[in-house]
Amino acid sequence: FFESVLELLQLIRYENTIDTFLNAVLVILLIRVIQCTSLPPRLALLTGTITKAMDDFWHSFLLIGLIMCSFAGIGTWRFGAEREEFANFEQTMQTQFMMMLGEFLPDWTDKYDLQVFVVLFLLVMFLLVLNFLLAIIVEAYMGVRDTNVEMEIEMEFLTDMGCVLRSMLIGLRYQTPHPMVLGGVLLGHKAKLSVGFMDLWLTGLFPSQKSLVIFIEYYRTFDFCEPTPITSYGKVDDDMKMVMEIEKRVAKLMGKQIPKLKDYKTDSEGIERLRSQ
């Protein structure tokens, strides 16, 4: 009988160990699922916000831990002999955590000292520290959102998935090179703002001109793949368009013409300005 009881207890301990291990595996898988959302820009709001605010989070958690431990020490020393909620340091920390979630102590208004402790804790932790933490999260979120807005290649998630699938099908059918391979080759074209048909053909990665034409026809449908226009006034992007418009108005008021690229050849300041553009 006792041997059977011992075997049963051993099986229970073994099952508890397996359950603990599986629970850890599920938590790791959950973290991996959240981490996988960092690839699409629109879905990377959670991971991007946490990454951007990690330094502030670290210092905030230090501050929160210090304040919580200080209040726990005071509560255990003052109310430990009178109330079960403050019987020891660990129990006091649990009580404070539940207070942060809105669960107040029963009869906490009966004693003046306890009233002062609860009100002071809520003022410091709930109204100040937690709002500081919320402000950090909002600031990091706005930074990630602004980055997504400025990102030219960012599109809606389902659209991105459809484009990836279509790109894979085109690659399988027409034997176009893998984007990572082609991108590594194009990194060597540092002096160029854009590449054309011959530039891609000379890479030797396309089996035929038809596959290259299909490749170009597909990627030219994306706005961010359009080449940056070069005029006699230099590279024209969105910022440069604004600068040119301002220069036109100033030149018109002063009765002068807008300087062109050839005007910068003998002007050292103009050269630096051209490089900055």
Image: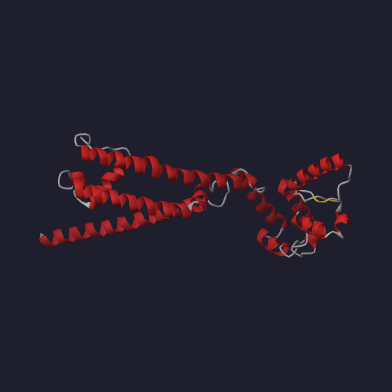
> In the figure, is residue 112 to the left or right of 182?
left
Q: Position of residue 134 (x, y in %)?
A: 45, 43
> In the figure, is residue 59 to the left or right of 219?
left
Q: Position of residue 240 (x, y in %)?
A: 76, 47
Vertical order, 176 against 117 (above or below): below
Task: Name which residue lies at 76% across and 43% down.
Answer: 242
The residue lying furthest to the front in this view is 254
Residue toward you, 142 or 59: 59
User: In the picture, residue 13 is in which quadrant?
Assistant: bottom left
Task: Name which residue lies at 71% across and 48% down.
Answer: 224
Residue toward you, 145 or 168: 145
Residue 123 appears in the rendering: yes
Residue toward you, 48 or 174: 48
Residue toward you, 12 or 83: 83
> In the figure, is residue 68 to the left or right of 191?
left
Which quadrant: the N terminus? bottom left
The residue lying furthest to the left in this view is 1
> In the figure, is residue 159 to the left or right of 215?
left
Residue 194 appears in the rendering: no
Task: Name which residue lies at 18% across and 45% down.
Answer: 84
Q: Position of residue 69 (x, y in %)?
A: 30, 52
